[in-house]
């Protein structure tokens, strides 16, 4: 088993939290993991990504080769498309559809939606709206993590345990919120991938 | 044993703690910052009283570490590649004095300049100093190398450099930890004159350093970090340095058909290279950074009948970081068809955070200089460098830490009127103070803006050495009190701030204007952790 994931978003949107949760679940599952992160300059509202590689045998490169990614997991719709060159021909794009607009020339929303709809394997989720329903828009990254679970080769329960592990020290309320978010994302993805 | 999931930087820090570290020194800089931060956050390090405060700059860090090593303790210095330029005087001379307690200098290079002004290769500095350079290919190897590095440093009496690059520093993976070693007892150098580099003594030390080169090469042959992998196909021989080895293995799913020298310790192991050239006439060098090994090979292989390819002949691009894809191209492997990103995807450059005090500084400055246009604003390195981009377009330079003040001085000396400098508080402490002294001594009529956000913002909010001391530093350097103004960068004071700046620019002498408001990110973090 080997899963190569491109995490994408904008600095400050919480993609490293997603990586931390998956990382913990992977270690608890005795998987090998390598996760290359971006720190520094680009964190100031710039495009950020992380390469996350899970495998049951040792992983060589910290970077995923072009055209070899299994999943693009993005918390922002335009950012999902930026990394398409990394996706393999049968790979999935799992993305939040709620745009993060901090630049003047952000693409037209209809054109963006059209590009996303044109992808043959995709899960499109308005994670901001769902996270708000769960209690806090800030949990939108965890909604997206939930939506990616069907492609991770790690059982839902393990990811739930990892969310508990990571958010545990922030108190019961935060844990419940995030688990609710995780489950919501997971359910949506199951519906969309069945159809 | 349960593996710990750690960033490359964190692995190095944990290894140092486990190997008996007594103190770590450094100045922040991507991608090296998390080494020090990990030690600072470690309860274990606190219990062991490991010194772990940021220094004013890389040179003071290097020197403090040398002082700790003088006392027989194990110590580490960490910095980004350009920090080596600042630390270089102390660094090069530390190889001549040698060390007492183990000393490892960790330098994180940033090929492709993800967060840097250049992509210089620190292995050159290691070679220049004639010391061992360790370049781990994996986080586990980095962990083991720190133990080895301290032992080697103490065995040879020389500092050791560990060179990492962005993808090693900022990649997380599982690492198995070893049994911990106690710190060294304080003990002074056996030779009381070891650290006295008077010419007569320095000549002796330098000869000793030269005489140790064979021993260092022998270590590189036998320590186990450099490996010779046999292959069935001798039509090509590959030398893969540091993490380039991983990219090579990625392309062959771990089973490379060609003989490979995995290179992770320098000086270059000549015997291992000879073993490769006995089998192969075509050599490919894969290295992250400059063509360091490739250039050196000419002296190591027979002059005729061999071809060497790498960054110099364009088989690998001359600049930028390596990727598994570039290695695939260099190997002539079949490329998989890849998708392209749709055209509507646009760049998303970094920008000031909402509410950042620097923005109010540049709004005021842009208004103030209108009257005197064109005004050259020499700036420096930090978040405020983002003012080079739209919408501010306020600054004309960003070269090296501290260069704002001194370049403005040189520009005035050349005849430019209203030369202005903008520098951050941490950068001012790092390398601005000495330049200011030059300016004050000549009373050069330039305006120096210190944009004090009470932190080192660019690298994630580390303590700034100038904290609470900027006014006293300026006055202590001889600035007249009436030429020092402290303002608050907020919209409501905009007109007032513009007026003060205008007045300063007209004045026939040095003026320093401190704009002070806390970085909003640092402020938020302070509230969160309370
Ligand atoms: C010699 C050297 N060391 C370290 C760095 C990395 N670096 C760039 S900017 C910066 C911090 C600047 O802090 P400050 O001047 O307070 O500005 P701020 O980012 O807070 O606005 C650092 C550490 C560098 N570029 N050069
Ligand atoms: S991190 Fe701080 S100093 Fe840097 S842009 Fe953001 S608010 Fe400004």
Image (spheres, grey):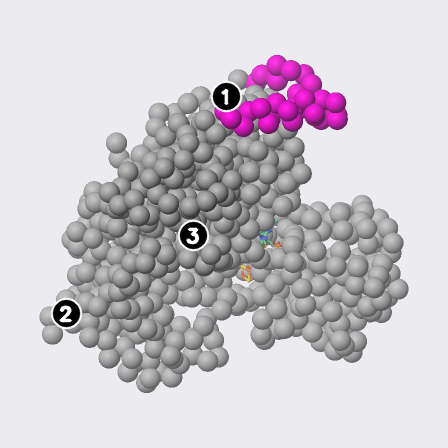
Whether callout 2 and callout 1 share a subunit is answered no
Q: Tell me, yes or no, if residue B129 can be seen here.
A: yes
Q: Position of residue B220 (x, y in %)?
A: 44, 31
Instruction: Examine the rendered structure and indicate whether residue B258 appears above or below residue A174.
Output: above
Where does label 1 land, which residue? B155
Measured as percent of width and height from the top left, residue B369 is found at 75, 74
Residue closest to the far top = B190
Secondary structure beneath dot 1 equals helix
Q: Quadrant of residue B147?
A: top left
Quick check: marks 3 and 2 in contact, CB under 8 Å?
no
Which callout, 3 or 1, points to the residue nearer the camera? 3
Relative to residue A160, is residue B115 drawn left or right? right
Mark 1 or mark 3, which is nearer the start of the sequence? 1
Q: Residue at x 59, y 38 (%)?
A: B128
Residue A135 placement (x, y as % from top left):
30, 65
Which chain letter matches label 3? B
Please give the range of residues in magenta.
B186-215
| Few, some or many residues within 10 Å of mark 3 (<14, 14–19, 20+) | some
* Residue B433 falls inside the magenta stretch: no
């Amino acid at each position: 088993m080997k899963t190569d994931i491109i995490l994408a978003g904008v600095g400050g949107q919480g993609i490293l939290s997603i990586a931390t949760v998956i990382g913990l679940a992977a270690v608890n599952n005795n998987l090998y993991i390598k996760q290359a992160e971006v720190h520094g300059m680009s964190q100031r509202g710039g495009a950020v990504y992380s390469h996350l590689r899970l495998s049951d045998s040792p992983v060589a490169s910290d970077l995923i080769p072009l055209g070899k990614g299994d999943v693009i997991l993005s918390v922002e719709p335009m950012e999902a498309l930026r990394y398409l060159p990394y996706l393999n021909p049968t790979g999935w794009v799992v993305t939040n559809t709620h745009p993060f607009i901090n630049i003047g020339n952000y693409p037209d929303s209809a054109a963006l939606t059209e590009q996303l709809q044109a992808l043959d394997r995709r899960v499109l989720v308005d994670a901001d709206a769902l996270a708000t329903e769960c209690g806090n828009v800030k949990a939108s990254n965890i909604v997206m993590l939930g939506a990616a679970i069907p492609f991770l080769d790690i059982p839902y329960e393990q990811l739930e345990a990892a969310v508990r592990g990571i958010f545990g020290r922030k108190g019961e309320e935060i844990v419940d919120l995030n688990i609710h978010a995780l489950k919501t994302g997971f359910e949506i993805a199951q519906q969309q991938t069945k159809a | 044993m349960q593996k710990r999931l750690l960033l490359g930087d964190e692995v190095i820090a944990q290894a140092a703690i486990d190997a008996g570290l007594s103190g770590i020194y450094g100045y922040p800089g991507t991608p090296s910052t998390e080494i020090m931060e990990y030690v600072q956050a470690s309860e274990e390090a606190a219990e062991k009283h490991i010194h772990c405060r940021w220094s004013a700059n890389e040179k003071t860090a290097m020197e403090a570490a040398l002082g700790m090593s003088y006392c027989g303790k194990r110590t580490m210095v960490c910095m980004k590649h350009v920090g080596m330029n600042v630390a270089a005087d102390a660094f090069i001379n530390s190889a001549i004095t040698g060390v007492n307690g183990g000393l490892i200098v960790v330098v994180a290079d940033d090929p492709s300049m993800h967060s840097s002004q250049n992509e210089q290769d620190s292995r050159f500095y290691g070679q220049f100093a004639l010391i061992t350079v360790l370049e781990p290919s994996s986080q586990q190897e980095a962990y083991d190398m720190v133990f080895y590095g301290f032992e080697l440093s103490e065995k040879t009496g020389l500092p050791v450099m560990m060179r990492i690059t962005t993808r090693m520093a900022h990649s997380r993976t599982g690492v198995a930890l070893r049994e911990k070693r106690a710190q060294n007892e304080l003990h002074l150098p056996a030779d009381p004159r070891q650290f006295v580099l008077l010419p007569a003594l320095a000549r002796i030390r330098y000869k000793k350093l030269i005489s140790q080169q064979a021993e260092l090469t022998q270590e590189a042959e036998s320590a186990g970090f450099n490996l010779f992998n046999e292959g069935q196909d001798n039509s090509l021989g590959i030398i893969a340095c540091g993490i380039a080895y991983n990219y090579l293995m990625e392309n062959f799913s771990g089973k490379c058909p060609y003989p490979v020298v995995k290179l992770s310790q320098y000086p270059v192991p000549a015997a291992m290279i000879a073993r490769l050239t006995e089998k192969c006439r075509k050599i490919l060098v894969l290295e992250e950074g400059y063509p360091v090994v490739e250039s050196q090979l000419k002296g190591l292989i027979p002059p005729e009948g061999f071809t060497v390819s790498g960054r110099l002949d364009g088989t690998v691009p001359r600049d930028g970081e390596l990727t598994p894809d570039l290695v695939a191209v260099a190997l002539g492997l079949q490329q998989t068809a890849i998708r392209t990103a749709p055209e509507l995807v646009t760049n998303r450059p970094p920008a000031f955070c909402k509410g950042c005090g620097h923005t109010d500084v540049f709004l005021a400055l842009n208004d103030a200089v209108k009257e005197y246009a064109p005004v050259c604003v020499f700036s420096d390195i930090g978040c405020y460098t983002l003012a080079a981009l739209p919408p501010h377009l306020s600054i004309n330079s960003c070269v090296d830490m501290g260069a704002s003040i001194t370049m403005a001085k040189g520009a005035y000396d050349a005849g430019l009127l209203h030369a202005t400098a903008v520098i951050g508080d941490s950068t001012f402490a790092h390398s601005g103070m000495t330049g200011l002294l030059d300016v004050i001594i000549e009373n050069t009529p330039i305006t120096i803006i210190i944009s004090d956000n009470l932190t080192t913002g660019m690298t994630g909010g580390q303590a700034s050495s100038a904290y609470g001391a900027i006014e006293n530093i300026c006055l202590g350097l001889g600035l007249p009190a009436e030429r020092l103004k402290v303002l608050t960068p907020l919209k409501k004071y905009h007109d007032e701030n513009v007026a003060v700046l205008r007045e300063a620019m007209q004045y026939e002498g040095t003026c320093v204007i401190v704009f002070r408001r806390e970085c909003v990110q640092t402020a938020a973090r302070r509230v969160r952790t309370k």
